[in-house]
Image: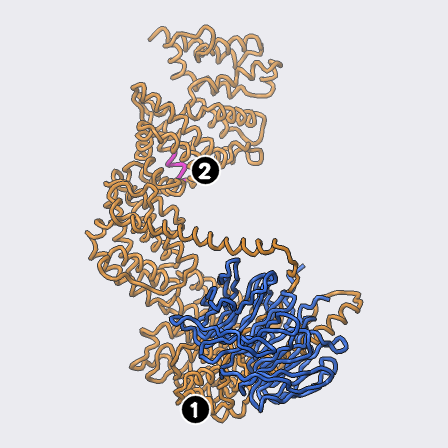
Chain colours: A blue, B orange
Amino acid sequence: MAVPLSPPPPDPQFVLRGTQSAVNALHFCGGAEVHGCPLLFSGSQNGLVHIWSLQTRRAVATLDGHRGQSVTWLQMLPQSPQLLSQGRDLRLCLWDLAEGRNAVVDSICLESVGFCRSSVLAVGQARWTLAVPGKGIDEVQILEMPSKTSVCTLKPEADAKPGMPMCLGLWQAESSSRPFLLAGYEDGSIALWDVWERKVCSRISCHEEPVMGFDFDSQKARGVSGSAGKALTVWSLDGQQALQVCSTHQLTNPGISEVTIRPDHKILTTAGWDHRIRVFQWRTMKPLAVLAFHSASVHCVAFATNGLLAAGSKDQRISIWSLYQRM
Amino acid sequence: MDPAQSAVRLTVREAIHTLSSCKDIGLILSTLEFLKRYLGETKNPALPEEQEEFETVHYSAFLRCLVSKLSPVWLELSPDGQLEELWDSFFLKGPADQAFLVLMEAIESTAGPSFCLMKMAQLLANFLSQNRMAAIMEEQCRPQKKPGFPLLQQTLLNKVVGLPDHLGNRLQQDNLTLFFPQNYFRLLGEEVVRALQVIVDALRGGLDCSVSFVSQVLGKICIQGRQKEILDVLVPQLTALTQGSCLWQRVCWRLMEQIPDRAMEAVLTGLVVAAPGPEVLSRLLGNLVLKSKKAQFVMTRKLLFLQYQHTTSTLQSLLGYLAMDSQRRPLLIQALKELLETWGSSSAVRHAPLAQQHYLSAAILVCLAHLGEPELRDSQDELLGSMMAGVKCHLDSSLPTVRRLGMIVAEVLSSRIHREGPPLRFQYEDDKLSRELLALATPCTAGGSTLEAGGSSPAPAATEILEKTVDGEVESANSSVPQVRPQDSDSDLDSDDEFIPYDMSGDKELRSSKAPLYVRDCIEVLTSSEDMERWEAALRALEGLVCKSPEATQEVSVELAKVLLHLEERTCVSGFEGLRQRALVAVTVMDPARVAEYLTSQFYALNYSLRQRMDILDVLTLAAQELSRPGHLKRHAQQVSSGSGGLCLPAQAACQHDHTAGSGWRAVVEERIRSKTRRFSKGFPRRELANGPNEFNSVAGYFFFPLIQHFDRPLVTFDLLGDDQLVLGRLTHTLGALMYLAVNTTVAVSMGKALLEFVWALRFHVDIYVRRGLLSAVSSILLSVPAERLLGDLSEELLEARSWLADVAEKDVDQDCREQAVRALLLLERLKDRLLPISP
């Protein structure tokens, strides 16, 4: 038998159109599945959040709460039908979506005008911790929710000048209740903060360009980050809470806006400024596919719990892909 | 008269009488037994003086008598074979030379296949296998007193060496394998060693010996071209024997010195080839080159300058031999000077075959590897002079291999001779040839640098090699690490290996979408834009745009061609030459008549660089090829739709996507049909050949005639028949290609006529590349012009060309030229065959 030729790259399963603006954020509704099909939230440049039914492939609702300013981050709260949305209008809105409602129940004013996405971590029943970019240019603020009390502000030492935080990831080891924060900075470094002690445990410089996105696999204690440069970096966290660079992977074109690992930790995808979605095997970082569907920068990629992949692009389209699904 | 003599004579005469007349077996046997006493080796041998008398005077005569009696009937007299045994023993026990001569004489005089002949051949085989040859040779090496000895020795020599021929002639089909040359000369080699062993022993015992007979045997065998057989046996044995023994070495040197002059070349060539290395050669030959003029000539001139079939290892042992002794080193320097002189002579570069030039270069490099710095410094000026001349004429050559040889040798030479200044550096391909040659130049430290060579020169090179190998090891060690790692992680469970990667060939670098969308915009950007990104994008987009919009291109075709022809690489664009060329070709294809007219006129215009002129030729050829390809327009359309230009405009990307999706769909359906269809016979799937009129037909003239018209009119800056022969070579090749592409066109006949005249004018051009071009042009004429028209309109030219071709096929120095000429001749022959059935 001859070596089987690699199959041609797949086409998207379907494409969602109608945001009429560049798609900046995507989020699959985790728990509340409607008829076995998950809901998809998309946040776009024009400040709208669309809720898509993947069964009818239509938008079922539109949330307008950011006064026409771009929506940069969307996140469902765990175990409650509430959605967090972050916009460039310096507001973080909490939406109640239960039983078809769609109203802002609460909002937080942000003090940073950057593009940094926030991060949320559930710490108990109806209690969660929120990390948002802070007032100072290089600060990260930690809030206790829903009381909105400021827990602390994480400010790097004076001599380290990492620049703005670009992306945040709150994270908690399974064994302990100690929250940690991973933050990617403008100078290309990634720092691990111990939130309780308000100090940097470890900091590595992974990229030469600003870190644009990362994802962390707490099972394997490994993470991967992408930057405005031409490389992906895989790093790991050892028992002493020290970060180490494992490997870097060169890309053909520079610019990664988001990196996401699939919930089953098998594959990861990147959203590229080169209009392409790249898929890698997470364990080996073997490139698996380059999906060239979009005609403008891809801004965000998200995975559903069932493995479905969604990618949102500046070309106003959201493409849905089904790749390497375990049946 | 001595009583012993007369007694022996009487006995022998009686015995001969008895043998010739008597039928009584008892008497015959007793007579023979009695005579055998004279050969010794019996219980009561005869007196020594009687033995000597018998051996010197009567032995041959008696043997002849024995031979004459030989017949089946006579041997049958004693049924138990006793007589036969006795008969044999007379030949095997007595003086070997006489027995051998008698046997050979008898075999030659016996007619046809017969019992006697076979019997004697058997006996001779027996004789050979009992090491009697060694006996002959050692006998000849003893000091001789007998008169007439040289004559006998000569006869013996002829018989010994000519034995396979004689026996082969006589025995024909029944020849024994032992007498085949390939076996016999091996055996003779063994015998020579054995004889030399006896001689060495005798010398140890204080006896006087001469090895000249063995030398003559060796020489004669080598002259007959049997070096390989005998030296394959001799060299290893002598190598082992001379290892620790001075006496053996002396004998060996003597053996070589005694070889007659006329055989010297054959022996030395064989030895140099057979010797495993310079050490062995030095041990076997000693300072032969200093003692014998002939040997010196062979070693320093003939093997270096006149022969070039030897391998580089042969060269290495030859030159290594010269380098191994301080007395011989001047010869090496002399050889290097002469080699360089030849290397630097432009006539040699032009006329010597490639293989010889390669051989010469290798010899120079090996010389350099052996010579130390002080020696080189003594003759620095002379060497430098030859080198400079050589570099020039090598780089002038139109053959890439010659140029490369020049570069490699010059690099090594300059680094060795001219240490003060910066060494020469050339850019050449790092392939097998260059690596081999460069490896030759690294000084061999194994044993070559015994005396002066131990200077500073070999040391750095040696450490360099060492570093390289160390580096290599480190590299391999490094490379083995990543190989291990995935396996490790493989073993840490998980089985998502079945993730088969999709095709990622489309993952190219993204270009900014600043590319112009119209041909006119492209021209504007290329001529005036300061935005380098836009300029590059325009260059990349141009070919696609030209193919997509023929009408728009035709409006500006000549202007565009002019822009492209004068385009210079303003920024570092990867593949600039290719992009420019493809765009030019596309323009030419779209509007062949006008653009070709423009390009051909520019070819002979002033103020162009050679590069541009050659670009013109390339573009014309490629465009003609494109035009003459059947269905080229369709192909173009496809190419554009699949967006192969590496261009990714949004619209095009989408269309590209659709295209691939479409073909994927088709493939799936076809695969399904194939799997569901039963076929009764399976042949090769037939591919439909695209067909259509040759579009080159109408425009071939524009391409061809302007190019061929002006070649003999030199300009101030451009002289095809003078210095710019490289362009002339390209021109001939281009004309040949155009001719070939003009197959099936109406203009082919007149093109062929013009081209034949062109070829005729240039047929004795000195440059090999030009001649190759001419020969390929002739071949393409023969292929393109219809046979009837060839014989009708061009018959005279063809006859002339034919005699020229025959001449080239026989005498040209270049292998390629000869082959091409033969090919053209074969085409001519085929032409004749095709026409013959029609003509009678």
Report in which chain the residue with disc 2 lies: B
Task: Decide: is B106 above or below B762.
Answer: above
Between A292 and B296, the one nearer to me in the picture: A292
Tell me the kind of residue under disc 1. Glu
Instruction: Name the quadrant containing residue B500.
Output: bottom right
Q: Position of residue B58 (x, y in %)?
A: 41, 16
Q: Is residue B432 visible?
A: yes
Question: Residue most toward the bottom?
Answer: B555
Residue drawn at x 35%, y 44% as measured from the top left: B317
Quadrant in which residue B117 is drawn: top right
Taking the image as shown, residue A155 lies to the left or right of residue B151, namely right
Instruction: Tell me which corner region of the image, top left, top right, bottom left or bottom right, holds residue A8.
Output: bottom right
Where residue B502 appears, x then y in whole percent? 62, 69
Q: Which residue is mark 1?
A: B524
At label 2, which amino acid type do we have?
Glu
Question: Would residue B603 be found to the left or right of residue B635 on screen?
Answer: left
**Looking at the image, is B685 positioned above or below residue B185?**
below
Mark 2 falls on what kind of element?
helix
Magenta residue span: B217-223
Q: Chain of mark 1?
A: B
How dense is the environment of label 1, judged by Cα within 10 Å: few (below 14), some, or many (20 and up)?
A: some
Between B383 and B527, the residue placed more toward the observer is: B527
Q: Are marks 2 and 1 in contact (CB under 8 Å)?
A: no
Q: Which mark, residue B229?
A: 2
Q: Give the number of the mark in front: 2 or 1.
A: 1
